[in-house]
Image (spheres, rainbow, N blue to C red):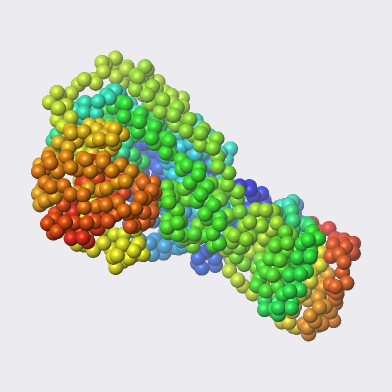
Amino acid sequence: MSLNKECALKYLRDAIGRDDAQFKAGQWKSISTLVNDRKRSLVIQSTGWGKSMVYFTSTKLLREQGCGPTIVISPLLALMRNQVESAQKLNLNAVTLNSTNTNHHETIKNKIRKNEIDILLLSPEKLNSTTFTEEYLSLIANKVGLVVIDEAHCISDWGHDFRPDYKRISRVLSRLPKGIPVLATTATANKRVETDILEQLGECTQISRGPLARPSLSLDTVRIDDPAARLAWLTKKIRSLNCSGIVYVLTQRDAERVADWLVQEGVQAKPYHGGLKQEREELETALINNEIKCLVATSALGMGFDKPDLGFVIHYQAPNSVVHYYQQVGRAGRGISKAYGILLYGEEDDQIHHFFRTSAFPPKCQILTILKYIEESKNGLSDNELKLSLNVQDRHLKRILEYLSVQDPAPIIKRNSRWLRTPHEFAFNKELIEHLTRIRESEWEDILEYGKKQKCLMQFLGEKLDDPHAKTCGKCSVCLNKPSTENDYDKETYKAALIYLGCSENKIEPRKQFSNPMLGKEFGALNSKIPKNQQAGTGYCLSRYGEPVIGKLVKEGKIGGRFNQELVTASARMIQSRWTDAKSIEWVTCIPSKRHPKLVADFAERLAIALKLPFHPALEKVQDRRPQKKMENSHFQCSNLLGAFEANIPDDFKGKDVLLIDDIVDSRWTLTIAAYLLRKQGAGLVFPFALASSAPGD
Amino acid sequence: MNKLSEDTEVILLLCCRLPANVAASELAKPLSHQEYVTLAKWLLRRGLSPKDLLGQRFSQHSEALEQADFDIKRLRNLLGRGVLLSFALERWDRSGIWILSRADATYPKRFKRILGQKAPAILYGAGNADALDTGGLGVVGSRDISPDVEEFVSRLARDSAMQGVNIVSGGARGVDTIAMRSAARAGGSVIGILADGLARSITTKSSREAITAGKLTLISPYTPEAGFNAGNAMSRNKLIYAASDAVLVAQAEKDRGGTWSGAIESLCNAWSPVLVQTEYPSDGLDALCERGAQPFAYENKNSIVDYLHSLRISENQAAVQVQLL
């Protein structure tokens, strides 16, 4: 045994606290590659295998040889916090630099200077910031001992978690001189992703690949198309499990909706998604401490979340690929002997994924427009200048700029907050996009095949992930030959779910500002603020456009040219019984349209009758405009309405609160501006109401 | 992505000014040109090349290096800057900047032939690198110039461009800019040898379009983000002379300024013929003639191409082959 290995073993035993501990197959090989050969190593092992032990031990040995600190690039804060604690067990001083600990940055900098830091954990975003490179990296960069890329599948173009920040890291990596050891780790990489990572690390990379099967997991799948049945099934299932877990859904909206339903049914559930910010850490802790039954989460609850006794992972909707599914279901049963992984899937998942796939890449014409715009500017353009001059959704603009700037070679770069065109040519790679789309389609087909339960479920997952050790598990519903449980729910709960899905109203929070001060002035305000007494009140929309029950009726009405009476009844019921603030309403009006003059007015009149209130068309469309839905960002949406409407209120309605009706609410600009005009003309409070919302991001 | 040779990687690690904190730069002050030359000569004598200093190989030579009085600790620190370098390389690559070192076969041969050991170890550039070996007419002069000289410079640059002669200049305000712009407008090829701000220059609309069209090559021996520094500006003059078949001085002040010292340096080292225009004489230009510059009576020249050609023949005879790392 080499001297290094003896030392390494001692560290391992100290860290674990057992004198007889041995390295797992692959751990020492990887350490030796990094420390003795100063080469590169790729570790593909399931979570809990001990990937961090590889770089902790390597760091320890390298530091003893006088090498500089290790840099660990890891995508998640939660994971970093864990790592900092674990490193201490080996007497390694690990720190993380992030936006939540800015007050410590100076101290950390000093420690780096004094060579007192062994491991520096960084997010990819951090590593990409110029200030960071200049202020911190330059302190240690003359002797970084080891570079660790955690969740390395993110650097692959084919990776299921492709992130632009990782793209830059992979480019830095491919320019890294030889002689600096690099460790890339991931829990899930099929052959294609593996090949892609190796391309960036170089051909001499040593690989360690282990079995992915998780022996504690009992897998099952159930196909349920009826959304109410799915909710009812979920309730019964969760009640029957006496452990805590995660319910995965596909959208933020579903996280809220399903969590809300479970709470209504007496289950302690909380939503978790990317729209929540500070609460996320609290929510994670609540689940870790078993203070709640489950989190209903989008994929935002992901990498790095580690709860060894997580008892179940139920997918309320199917994820888009086997890799995703394995990663998410693999969070259950890490440290316990029995856990459940259940996949629900059905018709609606197919539609959602189809939408995700078709909108995955920014459209070519938008990319080219933006590029041309930057190209023709004299000295580049700032984000804001682009927003004001291009009718493109903010998030699309952001994505396209990001997309372009991570191309290699990049057609644009950002310098001093301005986007500049580089001399590199840009060719829109249609073939690549088509290829990626085809891959996504086939990944989705794999999930559907998994759902058909034709072979051992664990084996199926392993084989799709190119795990050479894949074999039958003996405990999934296929191995045990269990009957399908799709009808396993209470009829009463099902009825409640139907009603729940029927009342899916949402609040509308109108805007309080014009998109910029100049527009504010054109609208007759002093600046960008809408005066408080000219703002709309909080409103409601009855449904999500196209969603089961109400949303579907709205869609039918929109297409057929008349909203049916059921919608009038449902609206009146909601307004009278569930909208307490709206009690003061004394009359009804609506948003006018030149294109479809009858559709909304007719509905508003019938609703007024149902509410026993007078209807008066106080707003007039004085100028025809391009449809509001064609306006892609705030600035264009707001300015498109300038001079579009005129309000006229009869004296006997002045000072009286009014219900303002529209069919579909999206950016909320139309309701905001209409309410502003009504109130300027003397209306009382204005309560907006829409039949459905189609806001992006839902 | 242009994959750098290992030799170039090492030369960059040793010589490149990377953004560095004061504390770090004490430990790892990049080698000066002279220091690099000394090291390169040492390597060459042993039949080694820069890449032999990389990684584990360094220790094989550290003893010998120490005996030869090299600061081992500093070299080791410089060579350890790989992570920092890779970030810079990624950034430069993304902006469209390439790098050539003296160890590269594609490094401009003229620079090695004419400047010998004075040829910069590293060149940063954008645009067509092959153009650097095709010669041309250098045009240099003061930053502040009279309208007459301005008119002369633009006429000369335009005519050269129309005859297919490259214009070589330094990208500074005044004569440089006018010469380069007039040549570009006439559709000519331009070589700009910058003392600062390569990264900034290549993203301006006009430069970018010319680079994309293959009409402009911009290079600098200094890092692409380098700011202005009078010393750097002086020191890059030699590249203007080395890239040109002859350099015309349009205006210069006697005994002061970069134009003057650049011309004198070239005259002393015989880098390339120094010409002075005769249409708008001045004390400075007269003084250059006294030191050996040739009057260039433009009105008598039918063809700039032929004239440069006649100069080039004598140039080639003086050529010496230098082996350089």
The residue closer to the viewer here, A618 or A253, is: A618
Left or right of A411: which side holds A43? left
Residue that appears at 81% across and 75% down: B276
Work out whether residue A641 can be spotted: yes
Horizontal side, residue A245 vs residue B92: left or right: left
In the image: residue A330, left or right of residue B256: left
Q: Nearer the viewer, residue A363 or B270?
A: A363
- Image vertical order of residue A665 relative to residue B39, above or below: above
The image shows residue A212, relative to residue A575, as above or below, that is: above
* Quarter of the view holding residue A97: bottom left
Counting from the top left corner in percent of width and height, residue A350 is at 35, 29
Which of the pair A162/A77 is nearer the observer? A162
What residue sits 49% from the left and 34% below the top?
A436
Residue A6 in view in this figure: no
Which image quadrant for residue B111?
bottom right
Q: Position of residue A195 (x, y in %)?
A: 53, 34
Classify B159 as above or below A645: below
The location of residue B64, given as percent across then percent down, is 68, 57
The C terminus of chain A appears in which quarter of the rendering? top left
Give the answer, above or below, for where A522 lies relative to A22.
Answer: below
Residue, x 75% and y 67% (percent of image)? B157
